[in-house]
Amino acid sequence: MQTTILRGLLLFTGVTLTLIGLAYCIDPNLLLARYELGVTGVSDDNMYRGAYGGLFLSFGMAIGYGFFAPAFRRTSAVIALLFMGGFAIGRISSIAAAGIPHEQIVGLLVFEIVSVAVFAWLLMFSGQKAGGGAAGSFINKPGI
């Protein structure tokens, strides 16, 4: 059951991030306008296409690959946990420094925090054998 949940979450997260990356590569303003943002020049365009487009695209594919490749599944889950966790940490630091952002961005933060919790739970407890500690099972554990 946990393998099914992990595979589904990897597929959903991978496809979603890949599509977001493609949208930013095609036209950053497609998504930025939703958050009352926009590209203001060539350097902005380059930063959005590179950081949001390229990174979302590549990380989305790496995360989604875990759906298809059992040997890469745990690695994909760790990548997803770190990617989503990094965004959550960045958003929280922004809230602390500058205040509450657009409501849709707050919704993304909630999704990122929940994703981190679910990926961490799946990584720590999926297929854990009796007597095995969670810390030792976090990475390099076959079976999921």
Image: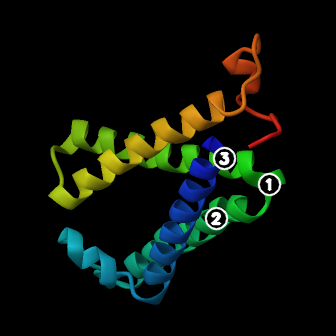
User: Which one is earlier in the sequence, the residue at label 3 or at label 1?
Assistant: 3
Location of residue 123 in the rendering, given as x and y in whole percent from the top left corner: 64, 35
- Describe the element under mark 2 as helix, strand or loop: helix
Indicate the quadrant where residue 41 lies: bottom left
Q: Earlier in the sequence, mark 2 or mark 3?
A: 3
Give the quadrant of the N terminus: top right
64 left or right, relative to 128: left
Badge nearest the viewer, 3 or 1: 3
Mark 2–mark 3 Cα distance, whole angstroms, equals: 14 Å
Q: What's under tag 1, amino acid-wise?
A: Pro
User: Which residue sits furthest front?
Assistant: 1
For residue 3, the mark is: 3
Q: Position of residue 97 (x, y in %)?
A: 23, 39
The quadrant the C terminus occupies is top right
Q: Residue 19 in the image: state x and y as whole percent.
A: 49, 77
Q: Quadrant of residue 113?
A: top left
Regarding mark 3 in the picture, which secondary structure is present there?
A: helix
From the image, tell me which residue sits under label 2: 64
* Residue drawn at point x = 57 percent, y = 49 percent: 5
Q: Residue furthest top?
A: 131
Specify few, some or many for label 2: CA neighbours under 10 Å numbering under 14, 14-19, or 20 or more.
many
Separation of residues labelled 3 and 1 (CA atoms): 10 Å
N-term mark: 2 or 1:
2
Residue where numbered disc 1 is placed: 70
Mark 3 residue type: Thr
Q: Is residue 83 visible?
A: yes
* Image-based side of 40 in relation to 71, left or right: left
